Amino acid sequence: MSNTYLVRLVGLILVSAAIINAAPDVHAQQRPTPTPTPRTGRSYSSKEPPRGSTAAAPQATSPVQFTDITGASGVTFRHAGSPTSQKYLLETMGAGVALLDYDNDGRLDLYFTNGARLDDPMLKGAAPDKRDPRFWNRLYRQRSDGKFEDVTERAGVQGAGYCMGVAAGDYNGDSFVDLYVTAYGGSILYRNNGDGTFTDVTKGAGIASNGWPTSAGWLDYNRDGRLDLFVARYLEWDFERGTLYCGEPPPGYRAYCHPDNFSGAANILYRQKADGTFEDVTQNAGLSAPDGKALGVAFADFDSDGWTDLFVAHDSVRQSLHRNNRDGTFEDIALGAGVGYDENGKTFAGMGVDAADYDNDGRPDVLITALSNETYPLFRNNGDNTFSYTTNTTGINQITLLYTGWGTRFVDADNDGWRDIFVAQGHVLDTIEKATNYLQYKQTPLLMRNTGKGFVNVSASAGVVFNKSYAARGAAFGDLDNDGDTDIVISETNGSPVILRNNGTRNHWLGLSLAGKGTNKKGIGARVTVTD
């Protein structure tokens, strides 16, 4: 058999301008009247779970086990979100994590993003305060014995503002991985100096994005050999607008506001120039639409033309699939491709997203995590610039109906050649249990095994940690112990991370080290074909 893999950067844990013919009507999505996804309201006050809920979803036996090694790892980080009585939406959205080998010793290290001190309430003009070390982002170096040591202060990567996500990539081609950290109040580009320290080069590099950036990722969208940067932004939001009171039934308590209360923010594409600085090319690239509310981004060559495309997950508005026109511009083809809405033409709370080939047909598909009562949309790539909604036919609908998902990845957990799905889960509302008796704020992690014909829930038998509940947000994936299988790190808002060691199977595996051209030393965006 021949399996084709897209090698790309993953970030919660990662693109002649030929005119493509319009999609056939059988796949095309007409633009419906958007139906807001309720994060508050009557659906959550129901005393009975909806039909088809996970209460009836069958469990299968997991062929692989994960062990929680957090306690013995040396990682003592705890995310500090600084919750207030004002219920600023910022408080419930953060906690990112990345795996990277920042010192090139062959062992993966950990980087966690953190919140910042918020006053209750925040005065006009006030900004999140990160000076207290308990609000610092944290970098942990993995030692030769497999334990981690905190090297944050020496490395100089404490962060600024209220941090959200992180993208790791060697943007300047010196073979040392750099970090771009998204934050409300000041995103930062940390250049790796190669001596265990980093330098904040944000201003000089020209990428000081403002507003509320959430996710980001490195890609070479124009194939010039230099890594560019895409920054996903969420809402036009500030603390003054954020004081809006949003209540829930029964009355008498405050909840986090739905994003429908705020305008969306435009994403940003930075092109790296020959001198190593960046320029904002968002408008010229056709990516300046301000109506998005982006929380996640995935890069893949969806149409197999050799150019990287962008899929952006949006919260409660239409999703975006930006096809690379190969001339420095993009076209949003989500509607014609059939990925703008769910199968009923409704919006959903797109949060986490990943793109990979789950059915081994050589084409990248898309999974988006969403809110409870929505299920997680799965779109299969048909190979003709259209996608089919396969959430129901693959079994994902029944498994995910009551969950709220964030960081996710198609990951071959058992090395059987089929990509499984992992999702870090936890509801947005810490008050959800006051509104309903069938949804929980803290939720168990989800592992769905790919059988080749669909997905089955194997979480309950995949390890003790899958039977514990978390307010999880981010997830990162990599081989921490260099044993050939994928380990997982989960980040939790206002909580401690969870480090999961994959105990492996006897199945075979293959590791690759790519050598790219120009400053793209890791070959991000390359396609690798492995044939038996």
Image (cartoon, rainbow, N blue to C red):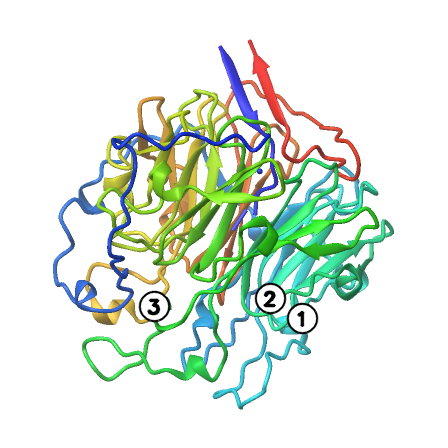
Against 56, is 1 above or below? above
Q: Residue at x 68, y 67 (%)?
A: 159
Q: Secondary structure at mark 2?
A: strand
* Left or right: 262 in relation to 58: right
* Left or right: 383 in relation to 103: left
Q: Residue furthest right?
A: 195
Q: Amino acid at mark 1?
A: Ala
Against 18, is 229 above or below? below
Q: Nearer the viewer, residue 133 or 50?
A: 50
Measure the C-alpha gap from mark 3 to mark 2: 21 Å
Q: Are marks 2 and 1 in contact (CB under 8 Å)?
A: yes
Q: Quadrant of residue 33?
A: bottom left
In the picture of the structure, the residue carrying the numbered disc 3 is 260
Image location of residue 465, percent across then percent down: 43, 47
In the picture of the structure, the residue carrying the numbered disc 1 is 160
Q: Is residue 305 visible?
A: yes
Mark nearer the N terminus (3 vs 2): 2
Q: Secondary structure at mark 1?
A: loop
Mark nearer the N terminus (1 vs 3): 1
Which mark lies nearer to you, 3 or 2?
A: 3
